[in-house]
Image (cartoon, rainbow, N blue to C red):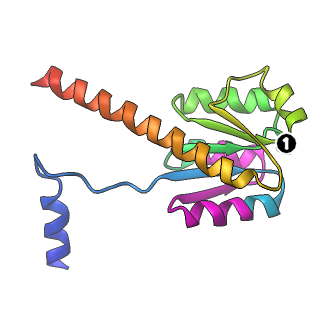
Amino acid sequence: MAHTLLFIISNKLPGKKALEKKIKILIADRNSNVREFLRREMLAEGYSVELAENGREVLKWAYHREPADLLILDPDLPDAEESLLLKKLRQRISYLPVVFHTFFSDYLTASKIINPTEFVEKGGSSIEKLKKVVKEILNKTAETESVKRASEEAERG
């Protein structure tokens, strides 16, 4: 135990690389089979996964838990008007990347409301495209954060 504690403390000293944070994805879909399938696939990719079955759960997560790094959203969730749901999410977590995972007809309605990070149409082989899109968005987000941190460090010193 003492060795573990020492490692954690020494890992936070200046010049030491911080421990890697596991990427968290929130999957919000009206269909329990889709939620579970996406959960298994994203866990297999090494992500931490939270699930929500309706708009109320998405907002509960946003206001009472540690923020996710990305949201995979079916915009046709029960008990949620997507425009209001997304507006509340943006007020709470403005930087949250959103991937719409839905049928094209649902996307046409939702895309008029918000400009999502990406759209992946539901279908038999959409999981590979979804994994690719998630990885690209998270890599882009990590690069942006890295540049921001470097800029802040340069200003300090």
Check residue 50 for magenta coloring.
yes
Nearer-the-camera pick, 132 or 25: 132
| Residue occupying image coordinates x 85% and y 27% | 108
| Residue occupying image coordinates x 84% and y 40% | 76
The magenta stretch spans which residues? 37-61
Check residue 96 for magenta coloring.
no
Q: Is residue 32 left or right of residue 24?
A: right
Three-letter code, disc 1: Asp
Q: Is residue 131 above or below residue 137?
A: below
- Quarter holding the N terminus is bottom left
Nearer-the-camera pick, 83 or 130: 130
Nearer-the-camera pick, 136 or 144: 136
Q: Is residue 122 above or below residue 145?
A: below
Q: Quadrant of residue 78?
A: top right
Q: Is residue 112 above or below residue 88?
A: above
Residue that sits furthest to the right in the current view: 105
Q: Is residue 17 above or below residue 90?
A: below
The percent position of residue 136, horizontal first and vertical second, equals: 52, 41
- Quarter holding the C terminus is top left
Estimate how packed mark 1 is, as few (under 14), some (14 to 19) or many (20 or more) residues with alpha carbons within 10 Å: few
Q: Secondary structure at mark 1?
A: loop
The percent position of residue 20, horizontal first and vertical second, equals: 33, 55
| Residue occupying image coordinates x 79% and y 59% | 34
| Residue occupying image coordinates x 14% and y 52% | 16
Identify the residue under disc 1: 79
Q: Is residue 157 left or right of residue 131?
A: left
Residue that sits furthest to the bottom in the current view: 1
The percent position of residue 63, horizontal first and vertical second, equals: 58, 42
Magenta segment, prevailing SS (helix, strand or loop) = helix
Q: Is residue 44 left or right of residue 82?
A: left
